Image: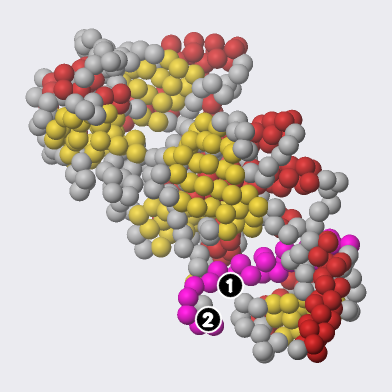
Amino acid sequence: MNKEIVIRSINSAVDFALLHDGKLIELHKEDENSKFKVGDIYIAKVKKTISGLNAAFVDVGYEKDAFLHYFDLGPKVRTLLKYLRLVKDGKITNYTLENFNFEKEIDKSGKIEDILTPNQTILTQIIKEPISTKGPRISSELSFAGRFLVLIPFSNRISISQKIKSKKEKDRLKSLITEFKPKGFGVIIRTVAQGKKTSELNKDLQSQFNQWLNLCKKINGAKTPSRILSELNRSSSVLRDLFDDQFKGVYSNDKSLCYELKDYIQQIAPKKKSIVKFYKSDKPIFEHFKIERQIKSSFGRTVSMSKGAYLIIEHTEALHVIDVNSGNRSNKSENQENTALEVNLIAASEIARQLRLRDMGGIIVIDFIDMIKHENRIKLFNHFKSEMENDRAKHKILPPSKIGLIQMTRQRVRPEMNIKTVEDNPNGIGKVEAPIVMIDKINNSLEKILNNKFITKSKLKLHVHPFIAAYLTKGFISQRMRWYLKYKSWVKVIPRDAYTYLHYRFFNIKGKINNYKGRHFAAFFLPFFDETKIFFTRRNSKKT
């Protein structure tokens, strides 16, 4: 699998796209002026404690107070508060924690008012960005994420990613980290640390330790509330979390951003520095990599898939609902059960992509097509879980229910990516789907026709608006030529002035194909039903 990162810089905003074999997997938008990003650390002030919620509302400088639950305090919060007070008073100048005495851990079932008081100063980290009418969610258990390791102050625990299965490798990593881990700090060993050399791990750990030292230096004299340590920009943080040997290119239309990315890759993977390239063509970078088309076709309420199947995605305040539909596709399977399984497997792969692409979080309910056989439901469940393995967000998937629903939760740390794909109707009032998606619909319709054995393929003609016809036939390797190379069937494109912009129709030697969106049964019997209807209409009219 070839992975590429495409970064578009427009004014103060940066759009980031992750591609797998040319297919859009993740899309992020970042405003350079935006605050309150996940990972940012603030020195804040407690506004009030709510015993009924066992939580506190904290002023971090946002219009809405941040939410701090008792469980997000961390077991060492007393130690953190003591350390913060001493640093602010200038009584601690050595920030290594080597000789610092830790306080007793808090009770897991304790009360927030026993720990925090109004107007108290506290160090907090953003764990969930402001969403809708809610302020950010914060934690006082600080962490500094690196490429291979995560450094946690006021802890001595070493944890290893569960995705590392080898016990030998786990033991090796744990022994290495134990040797050079700073006293008073815990470490989480990430999956990408597997197989890495001691020098690489030590360098990464030292980088995070330096971040802690910089944080401590900024505490004394910092205003309350204020941000004292910022997370990496979104593109660098994604590179940090996802970069591996499968990456073949990192492209950006911003020269200064290219220099920054080269410097960062030089630190984490010096041999891959050359993959960062500056894009300088007149054609917009997202159009060159065919990202704009994928955005238009992927963010609507309806998402088309292969073989005529499609998804309906609905968003509410409480949860997301996804409905899987087989559509009027050509049925090559022997029975309905096999058809349902085939469509469900396709849908599971697309849903896993959609969750990452839209960054959907919270409760998600998926209504797959009903299947009778238990082994097919299990096969679908396992397939969906395997497709979700590459998702960085924490998630939990429940087995199919008795009525065929799959319920899941996915970590929600920032607002959902929501892009409007509808446009003004060129034929009148209202909204329509983006016209660029129309080419995909024509492709799907043609595929249905050519896969339907009851429809005559001789002398296929496509009647469309002249503008669409010009697009389909432009160039030597036109869209029509691609159809011929793929299906070995020539389609004559006929411009029709009478057609509206989004209207199209297929014809064959027998005339108009009314049912290219229909099933085999309809394809065979529809002409007969039409003639019968005409016969009885005429007969009844004569009687009257």
Disc 2 marks a residue whose amino acid type is Pro
**Relative to 243, 340 lies left or right:** right
**Relative to 70, 266 lies left or right:** right
* Residue annotated with mark 2: 426
Residue 166 colored in magenta in the image: no
Range of residues picked out in magenta: 426-453
Residue 441 colored in magenta in the image: yes
Residue nearest the viewer, comparing 199 with 195: 195
Question: In what quadrant of the picture does the N terminus appear?
Answer: top right
The residue lying at 79 percent from left, 43 percent from top is 338
The residue lying at 33 percent from left, 43 percent from top is 129
**Relative to 230, 115 lies left or right:** left
Residue 410 visible in the picture: yes
Residue 197 vertical position relative to residue 309 in the rendered view, above or below: above
Report the colour scheme: secondary structure
Question: Do the CB atoms of the residues marked 2 and 1 lie less than 8 Å apart?
Answer: yes
Residue nearest the viewer, comparing 250 with 224: 224
Residue 193 vertical position relative to residue 343 in the rendered view, above or below: above
* Residue annotated with mark 1: 435
Residue 237 visible in the picture: no
The residue lying at 69 percent from left, 34 percent from top is 377
Q: Secondary structure at mark 2?
A: loop
The percent position of residue 107, horizontal first and vertical second, equals 26, 13
The percent position of residue 134, horizontal first and vertical second, equals 28, 45
Disc 1 marks a residue whose amino acid type is Pro
Residue nearest the viewer, comparing 20 with 340: 340
Q: Disc 2 versus disc 1: distance between alpha carbons?
A: 10 Å
The residue lying at 30 percent from left, 51 percent from top is 34
Please give the label number shown on residue 303: none
Residue 437 vertical position relative to residue 3 in the rendered view, above or below: below
